[in-house]
Image (cartoon, helix red, strand yellow):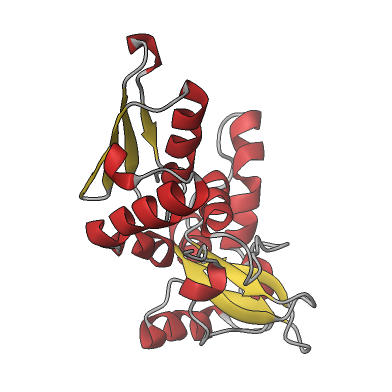
Amino acid sequence: MTVELTVKDVMTARVVTITKDASFRAMTVALREYRVSAFPVVDDAGKVIGVVSEADMLAKEALDSEPQGMPGMIAGLLRRKEHEKARGTTASDLMTSPPIIVTPDDTLERAARLMYTRKVKRLPVVDENGHLVGIVARSDLLAVFDRSDEEILKEITDDIMLNQFLTDPTALEVTVENGVVTLAGVLETGSVAHQLLEQARHIQGVVAVRDRFSYPPENEFDVLANFPAD
């Protein structure tokens, strides 16, 4: 049976880090030199205490020269935090803290949901003691959709239908095209059909699942894969 991929399967283990005392200029140079878009900020023990991203640093360029006294109390309150970052000169001033993190054993689904809901492009990966062990980016999570249609089809027929549901794969029509799974045919109950659809939906690399089983038309639906859109 195929093992579900976790963060440790796709993360980058070699990470460029900075300390809270790193200067704005040093971070700018490092961005260009290492071609990264963010730095985990670590303390002396190697624990992640924050993240500085390009967006954090761009606040200085965009807001530092803005005239003071912006009109409107609400507008001023909303922009105060951004202006504080714009005046920052070190990683400690600019970083987002506490950091949004994941562990190596977290599912890709959880990592993707965090990125989507928290509007971030990468997540530091930490061990049980909070020490940095890697970083995972959006592109790493999207890599699971590179699985071939043949691999997905084999997992559905062998692992799910044959091993889990004890169903003869030839009794149903299963097709996979560009990651889109279509299931058709007749099953004993609607409950079994829905369970099969749900299992297929969580297969790594599946973009969507199309329900074409034979039961009342009002129950036919397309199920999007459980992977957040950006």
Position in image of residue 103 (x %, y %): 66, 69
Q: Is residue 108 above or below residue 125?
A: above
Report whether residue 168 is seen: yes
Relative placement, left or right, of 49 versus 28 is right
Say if 66 sits above or below 25 in the image: above
On the picture, is 88 further left or further right than 16? Answer: right
Q: Nearer the viewer, residue 17 or 225?
A: 225
141 and 223: which is toward the camera = 223
Image coordinates of residue 111 in percent, x first then y, are 56, 57
Q: Residue at x 41, y 42 (%)?
A: 225
Q: Name the residue: 71% across, 77% down.
A: 127
Q: Residue furthest left?
A: 177
Relative to 44, is 157 above or below? above
**Looking at the image, which is closer to me, 165 or 83?**
165
Q: How many marks?
A: 0
**Left or right: 82, with 30 as reference point:** right
Which residue is at a point 40% across and 46% down the rendered structure image? 230
Image position, residue 116 (x, y; %):
50, 47
Q: Nearer the viewer, residue 77 or 197?
A: 197
Q: Up-down: is 37 above or below 78?
A: below
Quarter of the figure with residue 46: bottom right
Residue 228 shows up from this direction: no
- The percent coordinates of residue 109 (x first, y second) are 53, 53
